[in-house]
Amino acid sequence: MAKAKSYYFCQECGYQSSSWLGRCPECGKWNTLVEEVVKSDGGKRKSSTVTAKSAPVRIQEVTYSETKRIPTHCGEFDRVLGGGIVPGSLLLLGGEPGIGKSTLLLQTALAIHDRRLLYVSGEESEQQIKMRADRIGINTESCYVVSETVTQRIFEHIDAVQPDLLIVDSIQTVTTEEVESPAGSVSQIRQCTTEFQHYAKTTGVPVLLIGHITKDGTLAGPKVMEHIVDAVLQFEGDRNYGFRILRALKNRFGSTSEIGIFEMRGSGLSEVSNPSALLLSHRDEELSGTAVAATIEGARPMFVEVQSLVSSAVYGTPQRNANGFDMRRMNMLLAVLEKRCGFKLGAKDVFLNIAGGMRVNDPALDLAVACSILSSNVDIPISPRYCFAAEVGLSGEVRPVSRIENRVSEAARLGFEKVFISKYDTRNLQLADYGISLVSVGVIEEAFRALFA
Ligand code: TYD
Ligand code: MG
């Protein structure tokens, strides 16, 4: 008979202790240890992931069959996965509530019509799932749905359906009878993830888990889950806009630099293969404070519009705000502009926004940000036919960026007239004619003079 024993688990990092502690010795957080009851079964745990009897062999002698990936029939999803779902893999899809995780996976489940699928939901009833499927509007005969939260029951359903792919809508709602703590607690999440991992590795059936994300952007539950799974995908975007970005934070079977871009429509998520065309607002009038940046996300060039508003501070302390751009980076650029171009921005309110609810981390955005701030400050518009791709250094120098050829040729393709780049990048660009004029600048003042003088 299993014996119940309780341990204290850190809800942040999963650290286990036999007594209560005020501060977790692992992650240093205070007041995160919570008592959880764990049923011990005398060491007969089947948590090992090694399926066959193990014996060391020479690496040259290890053979494997070229595992065939399961295509998801969704170009953007396949791109992020590295070309489909690997058999026997365990994937975790994280994201804020309401961002579209359930929609993405249900849509994928409906699209993979040539395999048997089981969609287990602990959050919605079968009727609710059906309503969602009707909205998406794909008809398939091979997708089974069930509303269940206990893993032991889920495995019974699996035995009955014998699926080729399993989807579990939210790991935080499932519980195992092995552990007595409530759903969503560290020991539950860890044990359930291990059970699904064991299932995936022994049967070769891939398992896709949905995970919630906490306010500060980390996956709810312990970090240990991220170590167990083969890939962690994150679905993000601004809920007020239609855009959704799928990123791989970890991927044992592919690159983590690729992203997938989707748009939430009335009938589910649709793939966006040309994001630049949608992100650049169609302006008739020239307005000050707007500059277009040629950024690269994953391996694809993506053009985004940077908007800023500079005005005299009404209250004592000037306000600074940035949406979709790192605030500290913006403050650094403001300091550079103040020192190098002599603008008195210290007493001004500065608001910055990346249009379309995008969040961009490419350093090549710097020059567009600096120029849009200057444009708003002097109230002279920048032509919508110009774009920018360069990093700005602390001494005001305009630095080269990666993959400049891709950015320049994409700019030419989208019909821009001029692209502002670092003079050190001109050397990298061969004398090929891109059909666009290159403005090479060495320091930020040169860009300012070329635009507003
Ligand atoms: P959902 O997949 O339930 O989010 P999550 O599982 O990440 O919590 O998606 C929720 C939102 O998506 C919801 O606010 C409604 C919207 N939505 C659409 O706009 N179109 C659709 O076709 C569907 C199914 C949902
Ligand atoms: Mg959901």
Image (cartoon, rainbow, N blue to C red):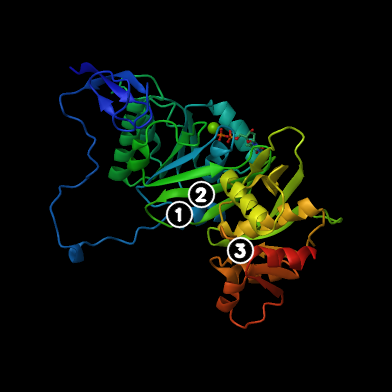
Q: Nearer the viewer, residue 357 or 349?
A: 349
Residue located beneath label 1 in the image: 256
Q: Secondary structure at mark 1?
A: loop
Q: In the figure, residue 396 lies in which quadrant?
A: bottom right
Residue 118: horizontal and vertical position, in percent? 45, 37
**1 and 2 marks in contact (CB < 8 Å):** yes
Looking at marks 1 and 2 on the same chain, the residue that comes earlier in the sequence is marked by 2
**Badge 3 vs badge 1, beta-carbon distance below 8 Å:** no
The percent coordinates of residue 66 (x first, y second) are 33, 62
Distance, label 3 to label 2, CA atoms, is 24 Å
Mark before the other along the chain sequence, 3 or 1: 1
The three-letter code of the residue at mark 1 reads Thr
Observer-nearest residue: 104 or 256? Answer: 256
Name which residue lies at 44% across and 53% down: 70
**Which residue corresponds to mark 3?**
390
Of all residues shown, which one is farthest toward the right? 285
Tell me the residue at 45%/44% (across/down): 116
Q: What residue sits right under mark 2 in the picture?
A: 247
Percent of width and height locating residue 253: 38, 55
